Amino acid sequence: MNDLIVKLLEFMKKTFSGVQPSGELHLGNYLGAIKNWVSMQDEYDATFCIVDLHAITVPQDPKELRRRILDVAKAYIALGIDPEKSNIFVQSDVNAHTELCWILNCVAARMGDMEKMTQFKDKSAKGDAQRASVGLFDYPVLMAADILLYDTDVVPVGEDQVQHVELARTLARRFNKKFGDTFIVPQPELTTEGKRIMGLDDPTKKMSKSAVSKYNYITLMDEPDVVRKKIRKAVTDSGSDVTYSDERPALQNLLNIYTLLSKKSIKEIELMYDGRGFGDFKNDLAEVIIEFLTSFQQRVNDISDEEVKRILKSGAKKANEQATQKIQEVKEKIGFVM
Ligand code: AQP
């Protein structure tokens, strides 16, 4: 990066976000979060992380996890995150994340805050809640540490993560009040139609990597025939006309995916299928998705492991430089001998 770019970055607002390498990325991850990151990277000093420490809050196979970390990094790049503009790194390469998490656990987070977190309730309810990891309970504090370490102004996330960004705001304010101005209080930023892409098998729950049925999601690596089958099987509401309405959440979800991937407005799509019914609509939607995925998959295949490892290594170096400054300031303020 030349000196002029470094100078410009000093004046730009900062954005930070991440995805867990906890499974194959799906359309919800892209349309709810990463698509927004791509458009933000020109306006912001942007940092995008692969949050592997978050992924281990639920059991992971080490070999698969290692593979997926590289796959998520490749996906970021293939979806349009430009490593020349945005810093991309792996969370566990920067020790300050876990250090700040512990400090926030002790001096800012309270049990009352944590007990309100709905994602913990949802995820622990999927198995035996008593056997859920302590890390899963503490996940939102680690996420606050991720965000606060980089003086983040704006956090682009899907709706499911807004409560966690709110917690980061609370912890920043609480710490600042007690120890003096240290952290920027970050803002969440949501896309509109993509903020909550719902499961194809159940439009009342979000599309999720860890869903029990593979008919819940479309992964970014799904083959054309798999996409066709999943869209064919996607639940639809009663009636046969293709119209957008809150009363028809399944169709609304499919229309949101269609508009976001095709750049056609909802109105245009409704007109296209006026009097034609769900069959044609679903067939065409499947082809819109396949077209997007095919070119994405080609770009992924063009990125080698070596190239992505080199990008992550230089990303970790830059992130470590920024995070070390902040964690030292924090340690000094809370009374550690520096
Ligand atoms: N269905 C969704 N609609 C819109 N946005 C979504 N995001 C996830 N699912 C949807 C957004 O994607 C970003 C990365 O999410 P994550 O992988 O870190 O964790 P998550 O939110 O817990 O996603 P999953 O797919 O549900 O993963 P698992 O099943 O492993 O927990 C976030 O900005 C998120 O809002």
Image (spheres, rainbow, N blue to C red):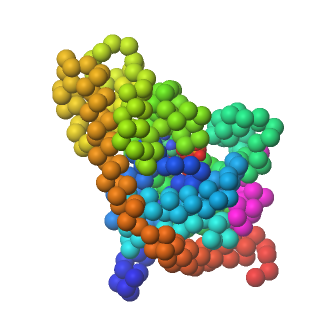
Please state if 242 lies on the left or on the right of 203 as rendered: left
Q: Determine which quarter of the picture holds residue 3.
A: bottom left
In the picture as drawn, the residue positioned furthest to the bottom comes out as 3
Q: Quadrant of the N terminus?
A: bottom left
Residue 314 x, y percent position in the rendering: 51, 78
- Above or below residue 287? Residue 23 is below
Please state if 121 lies on the left or on the right of 291 as rendered: right
Q: Quadrant of the C terminus?
A: bottom right
Q: How many marks?
A: 0
Residue 149 x, y percent position in the rendering: 60, 67
Q: Residue at x 68, y 34 (%)?
A: 126
Per the picture, the main secondary structure of the magenta-coloured stretch is helix
Magenta range is 98-111
Determine if the magenta segment contains residue 66: no
- Above or below residue 132? Residue 49 is below
- Above or below residue 167? Residue 42 is below
Q: Residue at x 60, y 73 (%)?
A: 323
In the picture as drawn, the residue positioned furthest to the top comes out as 239
Q: Determine which quarter of the picture holds residue 79.
A: bottom left
Q: Residue at x 31, y 25 (%)?
A: 244
- Kindly tell me whether residue 149 is visible in this rendering: yes
Residue 330 x, y percent position in the rendering: 69, 71
Residue 117 x, y percent position in the rendering: 66, 40
- Above or below residue 53? Residue 124 is above
- Kindly tell me whether residue 173 is visible in this rendering: no
Q: Residue at x 50, y 58 (%)?
A: 72
Q: Determine which quarter of the picture holds residue 290.
A: top left
Name the residue nearer the viewer: 6 or 263.
Answer: 263
